[in-house]
Image (cartoon, grey):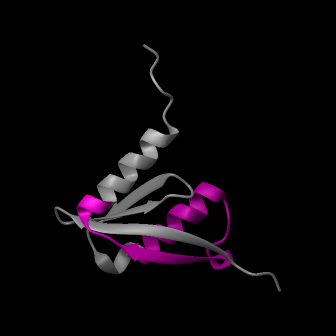
Amino acid sequence: MSEQRVFKAVVAKEAGWWNIWVPELDHVTSTRKSRKISLYTRSLIAAVLGIEEPSFRVERELVSAGEFERRFTEAVRATSPQEKL
């Protein structure tokens, strides 16, 4: 039996929404209800990769809204082409 792939989800609450970012896939989703974080995260990963939900695990990291924004912005800047002067 092969080992399940593990994805990390960064989660933060801001203005009544739970924002969920899967850095490995560079995708974000959100939900108003904390009990739906797992469902939305797993659905996002399965849809993006076209794989079955039982084939992977998710580890969540809860961070502040400011930390979420900092990490996400840093990741976007790192993958965006630099403007030429």
> Residue 38: x percent and y percent?
44, 76
Q: Residue 47 appears at what percent x and percent y? A: 58, 59
Q: Is residue 59 left or right of residue 85?
A: right
Horizontally, residue 65 falls left or right of residue 24, namely: left
Outermost top residue:
85
Quadrant for the C terminus in the image: top left
User: Above or below — where is 79 with respect to 55?
Assistant: above
Q: With 39 as the anchor, is 73 left or right in this view?
A: left
Indicate yes or no whether the magenta region holds residue 51.
yes
Identify the residue at the far right of this view. 1
The span shown in magenta is 38-67
On the rendered structure, is 38 left or right of 18?
right
- Of 83 and 60, which appears nearest the observer? 83
Please provide percent x and percent y for residue 27. 48, 53
Q: Residue at x 51, y 77 (%)?
A: 59
> Which quadrant of the figure contains the N terminus?
bottom right
At x 45%, y 48%, the residue is: 75
Q: Residue at x 24, y 59 (%)?
A: 66
